[in-house]
Image (cartoon, rainbow, N blue to C red):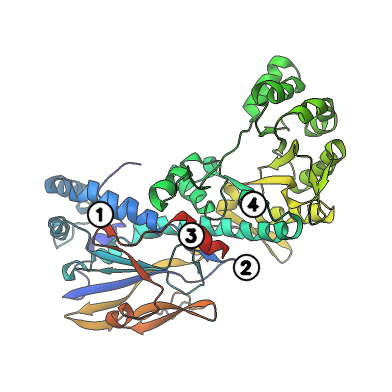
Amino acid sequence: MFRTSPLLLIDFYKAVHAEQYPENTERIVSYYTPRKSRLKEDKVLVHFGLQYFIKEYLIDWFDKEFFRRPIMELKKEYTKFVEISIPDENELFPKIEELWNLGYLPIEISSLPEGTIVPMGVPCVQITNTHPDFAWVVNTIESLLSTTLWHSQMSASVGYWYRQVVNKYYEETVDNSVRREGALSSFSYRGEESNESAIISSAGWLTSFFLSATVPSGIFMEKYYNADVLTEDVNYGAVSTEHSVMCSNFAVDGDEITMIRRLLNDIYPHTNFSMVADSYDYWNLVDNILPECYDDIMRHNGRMSIRGDGGNPVDIVLKTVPKLWDMFGGTKNSKGYKVLDPHIGMVYGDSITLERCKNIYEGLKEMGFAANNVSLGVGSFSFQCVEEIENDVPVLKPFTRDTYCSAVKATYCEVNGEPIPIFKNPKTDDDHFKKSHKGCCVVTESNGKLMCIDGLDYQSANSWKDNMLEPVFCNSGMIKEESLSNIRKRLTA
């Protein structure tokens, strides 16, 4: 992505709001809040991604692309891209130059701990200014915060939903010693909206699992969330073929069995790997070619997993696993469910929606098989959309910022030292979800649930003993850092 002044990462109209606030506005307090769920089922929202936003944009971008750059260079850029479109009667750049002269970003951000499950209507981020001359900065960063945070929260939530399905069926059918974090993998990289979106999306997934095909998500967790890929289970991938490999070998060999034997005996004699199996005739490969490779498979010092890649995944998995059991056998685990011989397995990485994941595990259970007989991959579709049944008809609901109606709203200001609660309450808003909080907020826990108390002034909220919104950033620096390991602990607690 191109780099520019972070004060250009705005909607145009943000440039003129400084002059529009009441004269002598010395403080503004705003909150990022998921206001309403548009999903039919009760799917929770996981708070994740704020620390990335702070480190990447509020610290790194502001340092390198604003405070370190010559002021005349910033002015030329601002004039060219902002003032040419907004010929405001008041000069726009002087406030930018004042911030540059200050030399730091006079903002304090408080947050719920990342990995917190956030109910609707409960704010998870508070933003205010630390210098009375720069109240306008608070909502200037709104667009950038919103576009970054909603997606990371959405992806972490998707991972959490899948983790609950895994927890249920692993608890019922899988030995307790088998780690649930490795049940599913993210295969979403190539199908996301952009490179940044793909990395953030798989990073959100890694809050609940440690398998992802997206290599840079491990780098993301090291850089922004204090993880260490050498000492903890951050992000693992897998050895696998793809269609280009299988088809090119078929074109040379004239068959599929030659490549299968080469994989088992020559390329990966001591390595677990998966092999895409439906380039031509999946059931011929399963029913006829695999039996011919029986001795090679059983001699192989590792597991070969058959990977389906097209068709109906529920039908294919539930038909394949019993066939593999009949061919290669296996054992029963401590819970009485069948587990395939460790030399053979199954992977399915295409079109595994949340509903299909449930149906696969339930179907295996009904046939007496443990859920860990198959590894499932979740692609970009499931990170961007959910299928819900309405009036017996499947309806696709895409994920957007409005899935949870997440928004940053100012609810408090101080003018000439006087505390003033502010709020919005549109009469045309039939279900009132756009009604904002009024005044400053605190988040507390009551009977195991989070709740918001509003109507406070800044001093009262700031000194509230049990406020779960804790300061994490102040004046261009982190004051409290989060780790991937702690986020995972919160989600699995």
Nearer the N terminus, badge 3 or badge 1? 1
CA distance for labels 3 and 1: 31 Å
Q: Say if mark 3 contacts mark 4, CB within 8 Å.
A: no
Q: Nearer the viewer, mark 4 or mark 1?
A: 4
Q: Nearer the viewer, mark 2 or mark 3?
A: 3
Q: Secondary structure at mark 2?
A: loop
Q: Residue at x 81, y 53 (%)?
A: 337
Residue 387: percent from left, percent from top:
65, 57
Q: Secondary structure at mark 1?
A: helix
Residue 420: percent from left, percent from top:
26, 82
- Per the image, the residue denoted by label 4 is 179
Q: Say if mark 4 contacts mark 1, CB within 8 Å.
A: no
Task: Name the outermost residue toward the right.
Answer: 326
Nearer the N terminus, badge 2 or badge 3? 2
Question: On the image, which quarter does residue 418 sit in?
Answer: bottom left
CA distance for labels 4 and 1: 45 Å
Nearer the N terminus, badge 4 or badge 1? 1
The reply to whether residue 413 is visible in this rendering is yes
Task: Name the mark on residue 40.
Answer: 2
Residue 124 in the image: above or below residue 58:
below
